[in-house]
Image (cartoon, rainbow, N blue to C red):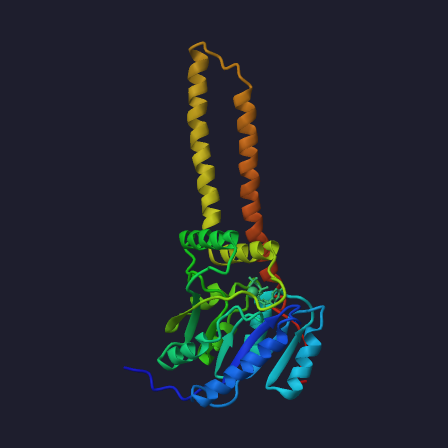
């Protein structure tokens, strides 16, 4: 049986902003224009709301958001500190009230032209529509290749991700409500949302370069997000550690047998090099194994505290 046809939805854009004073005006201008176009073509039922989440910026971002909220259809949410991109995005998704929410980056790297197609896919029955990059031309060689390796590794670890999809996506109300049920504080949204189920669809787009300012995702934050993705969704690294331990144990068993035989045959082993080498090697492997276990333990530690996922200091609606 087909689902009943959807009524024309209301729309909100959800945009996390961290020190984005250089792009904010352009962003609001373009989203307002797009909103008018969408309304005109009958894809949305009223002017779209622009939800800007200030993730603890230290520049002029919040002042600009407040000013924009007076004249435009803008709602500002100010987080109490810098929580990071994922919690900021979640704060916006949990606060916005519209029927469908489109999340995108503040720097206009995500192609706005893809949004009408996303809404069409939603009207066609999809509850979640993923924006997928058709190329990585605008990336550095390093980012392109590290991303490719990462998606391969995640696939191997059994994590269901959509390659080349970041956080440019449309979500319907049902999906948002389902996401609300996930109380975890270690947030990797693109994994969580893929996990929700629902009919989904994808729209391809070309990712542009940042319109202004510089990346707010330095290498350190990228690594953190990547690790978050692995340890939030897969316990396979823990199993790999156990397998490595078992394999090494097996080999050392064989080696001990060999050494004993050699001893009885009168060729006593004289080299200390092999001993020293194996001590260092085993020590290293043990430390790595401990590190992996520690990473998961840390995660459990954070989850058991049940701290809030984000803290809103104020909104422009207050
Ligand atoms: N961002 C955020 N909090 C942070 C870091 C980034 O809200 O701690 C936002 C940022 O303002 C932007 C989006 O996350 O809207 C993506 O960041 P950016 O464009 O700098 O990342 P890149 O495209 O370079 O990976
Ligand atoms: Mg960017």
Q: Quadrant of residue 204?
A: bottom left
Q: What percent of the width, then of the height, locates residue 139?
A: 51, 58
Which quadrant does the N terminus fall into? bottom left
The residue lying toward the viewer, choosing from 220 and 172, is 220
Which quadrant does the C terminus fall into? bottom right
Q: What percent of the width, then of the height, locates residue 45?
A: 47, 90
Q: What percent of the width, then of the height, locates residue 289?
A: 53, 42
The residue lying toward the viewer, choosing from 50 and 230, is 50
Ligand 1 location (quadrant): bottom right
Residue drawn at (56%, 19%), measured in percent from left and top? Answer: 272
Residue drawn at (63%, 77%), measured in percent from left and top? Answer: 25
Residue 244 can be seen in this image: yes
Q: Is residue 45 above or below residue 195?
A: below
Residue drawn at (35%, 86%), measured in percent from left and top? Answer: 5
Q: What percent of the width, then of the height, locates residue 89?
A: 57, 71
Q: Quadrant of residue 26?
A: bottom right
Q: Is residue 260 above or below residue 118?
A: above
């Amino acid at each position: 049986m087909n689902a009943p046809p959807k009524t024309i939805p209301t729309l909100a854009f959800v945009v996390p902003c961290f020190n984005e004073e250089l792009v904010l005006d352009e962003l609001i201008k373009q989203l307002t224009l797009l909103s008018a176009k969408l309304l005109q073509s009958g894809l949305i039922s009223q002017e779209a709301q622009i939800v800007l989440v200030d993730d603890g910026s230290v520049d002029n971002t919040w002042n600009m958001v407040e000013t924009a909220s007076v004249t435009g259809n803008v709602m500002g949410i100010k987080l109490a500190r810098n929580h990071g991109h994922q919690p900021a995005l979640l704060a916006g998704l949990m606060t916005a009230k519209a029927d469908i929410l489109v999340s995108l980056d503040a720097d206009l790297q995500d192609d706005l032209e893809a949004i009408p197609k996303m809404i069409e896919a939603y009207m066609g029955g999809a509850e979640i529509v993923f924006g997928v990059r058709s190329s990585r031309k605008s990336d550095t060689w390093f980012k392109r290749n590290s991303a490719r390796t990462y998606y391969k590794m995640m696939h191997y670890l059994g994590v269901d991700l959509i390659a080349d999809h970041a956080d440019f996506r449309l979500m319907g109300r049902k999906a948002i409500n389902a996401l609300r049920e996930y109380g975890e504080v270690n947030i990797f949204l693109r994994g969580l949302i893929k996990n929700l189920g629902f009919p989904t669809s994808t729209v391809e787009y070309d990712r542009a370069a940042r319109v202004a300012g510089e990346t707010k995702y330095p290498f350190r934050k990228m690594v953190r997000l990547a690790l978050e993705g692995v340890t939030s969704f897969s316990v396979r690294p823990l199993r790999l550690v156990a397998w490595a331990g078992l394999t090494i144990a097996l080999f050392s068993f064989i080696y001990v047998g060999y050494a004993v035989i050699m001893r009885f045959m009168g060729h006593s082993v004289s080299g200390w090099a092999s001993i020293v080498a194996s001590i260092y090697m085993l020590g290293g492997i043990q430390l790595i194994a401990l590190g992996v276990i520690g990473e998961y333990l840390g995660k459990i530690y954070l989850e058991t505290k049940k701290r809030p996922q984000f803290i809103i200091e104020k909104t422009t609606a207050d």
